[in-house]
Image (cartoon, helix red, strand yellow):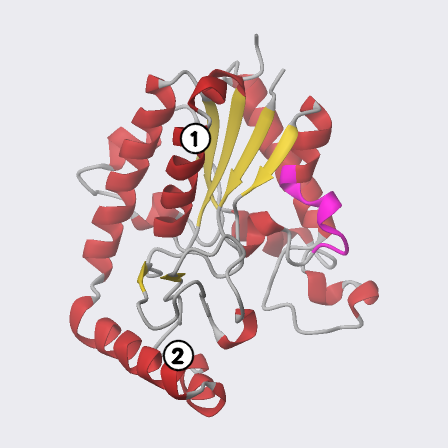
Amino acid sequence: MFKYIVSGGCSFLEGIGCHTTNNSVVHSFKKKFNGELVQLAKSGASNDRTIRKIIDWSVVNENQLKNTLFLIGITAIHRYESWDELLQGYAQGSSQHGGPYKDNQPYEHHNIDYPHARGSELDLHRGAEDQLLTKVQRMYYKYLQNNKVDLDKTLRNIILLRSFFEKHGSKYLIFNSMGNLKKMSKGHRFFNEVFNNKNYYSDEGWYESLFPKGRGMFAAEDERFGGSNDWGHPSEKSHKLWFEKLYKHGEEIGLWKE
């Protein structure tokens, strides 16, 4: 039915927390529809990065957009992306996700959860260039970041992304990965425009599907990981549940009809 399954988001959609990413939610869609998976999700990514990667891929593959299913997981709205002139061709992300950026785009995730504890950890582990980056990020969160502005931008970008998909006849599902954007946006002027769209699955956020379901929903509870720190990522059990919820929603709105 779909030639391509294109995934955009952060570590949740990348499958961090699955024993093998072949059991992640996006791979379940790949198996269901026998399409080629284009994995654009990346650990630590922002919504800014998701939109950039989706548009970049779509422009190159414009003749395939009617044969494509886009799966977009909205991540934390305070994350942002900007050009990094010092780290040409590299993106450090956070200290846990450092290293070369596989598509050689000199962007920086800028996803540090400052002013939380991870900021002090970065001071200990970053080199000279990264120390400068940490200072820039702290200045950003102290003087330039605002939750209302972040929410405005996130909802506005969802409207624009949705319009892009519909213009090109693409099928898509947008949903909450980290947190519940619908609850956060209650009363916002863009609320109806975003959440009345049938392709936005907003019954619950991914995290909300984890906590009431009991043990085994987080990767750290899986013995195959040896109890290692997974930063609270969903397990394969959770990915299976989330696939079932999203597939059922798509069925209810007629998304899987030819």
Answer above or below: position of 245 versus 10.
Answer: above
97 or 221: nearer the viewer: 97
Q: Position of residue 27 (x, y in %)?
A: 68, 38
> Which tag is nearer the camera, tag 1 or tag 2?
1
Hey, which residue is sitting farthest top in the picture? Answer: 258
Give x and y (percent) for residue 249. Answer: 55, 26
Can you identify the residue that label 2 sits on? Answer: 116
Q: Which comes sooner in the sequence, label 1 or label 2? A: 1
Span colored in magenta: 18-26
Amino acid at circle 2:
His
Q: Residue 60 got which mark?
A: 1
Question: Is 240 on the left or on the right of 205, as rendered?
Answer: right
Q: Residue at x 76, y 52 (%)?
A: 20
Q: Nearer the viewer, residue 50 or 178?
A: 50
Residue lying farthest to the bottom in this orientation: 124
Residue 145 to residue 205: above or below: below
Q: In the image, 59: left or right of 146?
A: right
Residue drawn at 61 percent across, 27 percent down: 247
* Residues at discs 1 and 2 in contact (Cβ within 8 Å): no
Residue at the spot 40% in from the left edge and 38% down from the top edge: 56
Q: Position of residue 129 (x, y in %)?
A: 37, 82
| x and y, in percent, of residue 155 in the image | 27, 42
1 shown above or below 151: above
Q: Is residue 132 magenta?
A: no
Residue that sits furthest to the right in the current view? 224
